[in-house]
Image: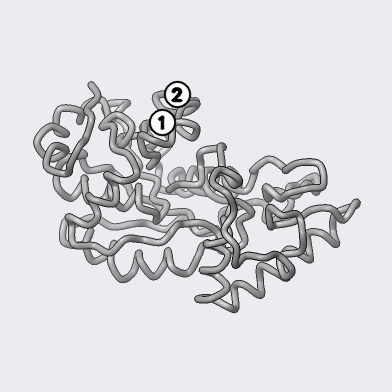
Amino acid sequence: MTLRVNNVEQVASEGLDMRTHATGNSGCSTVLNYGGGRQTVAMCVLIARGILPRPDVIVMADTDRENPSTWEYLEQHVKPFLAKHDLAVEIAPHSLATVDLYSGNGDLLLPVFTDTGKLRTYCSNEWKRRVVDRYLRSKGIKGGTRWIGFAFDEKRRWAGMHGKTEGKWATICPLVDLMINTAACLKIIEAAGLPQPHHSACWMCPHKRNAEWRFIRDNYPEHWQQAIAMDKEVRENDAKGGVFLHHDRVPLAEANIDVDESEGKIQQCTLGVCFV
């Protein structure tokens, strides 16, 4: 069953009908992959309100490079909110990752821009999905339903994974089944009395728009300098020297991040495991 959500009250009155579908594999563990952005925060509100069923685990992967604002929001707002409903976010540590910036064969995992195109995104899989899987296995959870917080208007991200089963895991995007778009997520968060979270992403992620780069530079100068250093490092380690964190394909320190790019120039990760 799908519902077109026009407002929060409609979600509250009609959302209960999709509990069974959202749960996926009945009798197995249901895991909400918390990313710290507006979509998964909205899902936490829906869970607290009883519109979505309670998952067995809410888990967030620590990439060791997450925007500080994501951790601040989690500590100041999400944890106290969930605690009122006997819920908590568990953290899968970065120590569970087996690789960091480079794979075992030396390939760079970041989706950097090159002189001729762009590298694929492998960091999400290595730093998030596999880390969460290892964390869950350490708790004795080896299968069930994995909830990902893609909104209905993010079809490019969820189309290849929503409702699909891989091994012992089924992937479900509850916001898609409820037809809740990103704008509705913002209304759900506002109605819960919570401030809006900033975008969740690593502080050096090449998928950033200029506004997000400015946010890091202006609010977290230490991480801005770390991003500049990493941009230089990966270029020095590249055989051709032609890889960049910024989409203009110039050193990050030289990029004009004070000018907003045209709509659609930068796109989000299509791999679908940078939990939102």
In this picture, residue 244 sits left or right of residue 123: right
Is 165 placed above or below 219 here? above
- Among numbered discs 2 and 1, the one appearing first in the sequence: 2
What is the quadrant of residue 37 in the picture? bottom left
**Is label 2 in a helix, a strand or a loop?**
strand
Residue under label 2: 165
Q: Position of residue 276 (x, y in %)?
A: 43, 48
The N terminus sits in image quarter: top left
Q: Dot 2, crowdedness within 10 Å: few (<14), some or many (≥20)?
A: some
Q: Position of residue 262 (x, y in %)?
A: 58, 49
Residue under the image location 41 percent in, 31 percent down: 171
In this picture, residue 187 sits left or right of residue 252: left
Q: Are marks 2 and 1 in contact (CB under 8 Å)?
A: yes
Q: Dot 1, crowdedness within 10 Å: few (<14), some or many (≥20)?
A: many
Residue under the image location 24 percent in, 62 percent down: 194
In this picture, residue 125 sits left or right of residue 244: left
Q: Position of residue 238 (x, y in %)?
A: 85, 54
Where residue 171 is drawn, which disc sits there?
A: 1
Is 3 placed above or below 151 here? above
Residue found farthest to the right: 240
Q: Amino acid at mark 1?
A: Thr
Q: Amino acid at mark 2?
A: Thr
Residue found farthest to the bottom: 222
Residue found farthest to the left: 13
Where residue 24 is drawn, which disc sits there?
A: none
Q: Position of residue 93 (x, y in %)?
A: 50, 59
Is 118 placed above or below 254 here? above
